[in-house]
Amino acid sequence: MARGRKKVSTSSLDAQIEHQKAVMEKAKLKYEAEKEALADLIRLRNEMRKEELMAAVIKSEHSYEEIMAFIKGSSESEEE
């Protein structure tokens, strides 16, 4: 004899749906907070790298033009 599906009331399903919505909203808020924390860490890392790069440029014996040419991947020997 085949067994049928267990009868579930619509009010029970409505309660489960509301519970699941609440769970998803909480997860979404956590995700957004974690996403913002990651963005903050990336911004901090980029600021530190910028400061480090600027300090290296200032201490360098090379001119601004030489540094920019190097960064852009060109050199005087390529131009000849």
Image: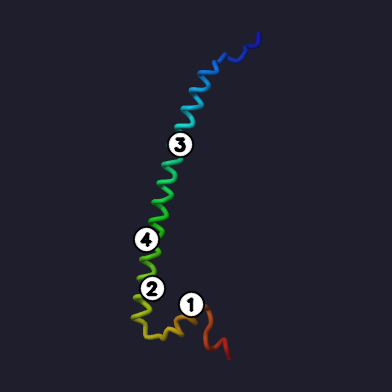
Q: Are marks 3 and 4 in contact (CB under 8 Å)?
A: no
* Discs 2/3, front: 3
- Marks 3 and 1 sit apart, C-alpha to C-alpha, by 46 Å
Question: Quick one: label 3 or label 4, which is nearer the N terminus?
Answer: 3
Measured from the top left, where is residue 24 in percent x and y?
47, 35
Determine which of the numbered discs, if any, sits on residue 71 in the image: 1
- Marks 1 and 2 sit apart, C-alpha to C-alpha, by 12 Å
- Under mark 1, the amino acid is Ile
* Discs 4/2, front: 4
Q: State the SS at label 3.
A: helix
- Under mark 3, the amino acid is Glu
Q: Nearer the viewer, residue 27 or 57?
A: 27
Measured from the top left, where is residue 23 in percent x and y?
45, 33
Q: How many residues crowd mark 1 within 10 Å: few (<14), some (14–19), many (20+)?
A: few
Say how the picture is coloured: rainbow
Is the residue 19 above or below the residue 46 in the image? Answer: above
